[in-house]
Every structure is written in C-alpha cells, then in structure tokens.
Amino acid sequence: MTYIWTASGWLYLAAVMDLYSCKIVGYSLSIRMTADLVCATLQIVIHTRQPPIKS
C-alpha cells in the first residue's frame, strides 16, 4: 500500500505483485486506507487470475 498526492487530494493505492514475473496483477484506489481496499484488491486478483483451489 502507498499513497499518492493528486489534484483532488490523497489517494491510497493497494497493489498485488506476482513475485515470479514481478508484474502488478491487480490494484485498487480509494480515498481511505481501509481493510476493504486490500480485500477488494485481492478479490480482483483472484477473479482475474483464477488460481487453482487446493483441498
């Protein structure tokens, strides 16, 4: 997580990086730094990458 100054004020950025390829695989922006921001980012990554489910 990090924060970015914009003309509208501070924005908070949560990103997930694939450690194998070193690419950002998902991110979310919000005006508040909350756990929901992180959860939303993880949900986006899981939805787009569709990792296998281990039992």
Image (tube, rainbow, N blue to C red):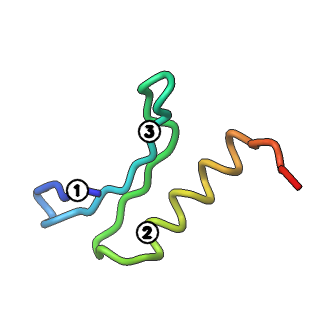
Query: Residue 48: percent from the left, percent from the top?
Result: 68, 42
- Label 3: which residue? 17
Query: What kind of residue is marked 1?
Result: Thr
48 relative to 6, above or below: above
Q: Give the mark nearer the N terminus: 1 vs 2.
A: 1
- Label 1: which residue? 2
Quarter the C terminus occupies: bottom right
Residue at position x 43%, y 76% from top? 35
**Quarter of the image where one finds residue 37:** bottom left
Label 3 crowd bin: few (<14), some (14–19), many (20+), radius 10 Å? few
19 relative to 10, above or below: above
Label 2 crowd bin: few (<14), some (14–19), many (20+), radius 10 Å? many
Q: The residue tagged with tag 3: helix, strand or loop? A: strand
Residue at position x 75%, y 43% from top? 50
Q: The residue tagged with tag 2: helix, strand or loop? A: helix
Query: Residue 2: percent from the left, percent from the top?
Result: 22, 56
The mark lying in front, picked from 2 and 3, is 3
Task: Give the spatial CA distance, label 2 vs label 3.
Answer: 15 Å
Q: Considering depth in this image, is 11 or 35 the residue closer to the camera? A: 35
- 9 vs 38, left or right, is left
- 10 vs 53, left or right, is left
- Label 2: which residue? 37
- 24 vs 39, left or right, is left
Task: Give the spatial CA distance, label 1 vs label 2.
Answer: 12 Å
Query: What kind of residue is marked 2?
Result: Leu
Name of the residue lying farthest toward the front: 55
Task: Give the spatial CA distance, label 3 vs label 1.
Answer: 14 Å
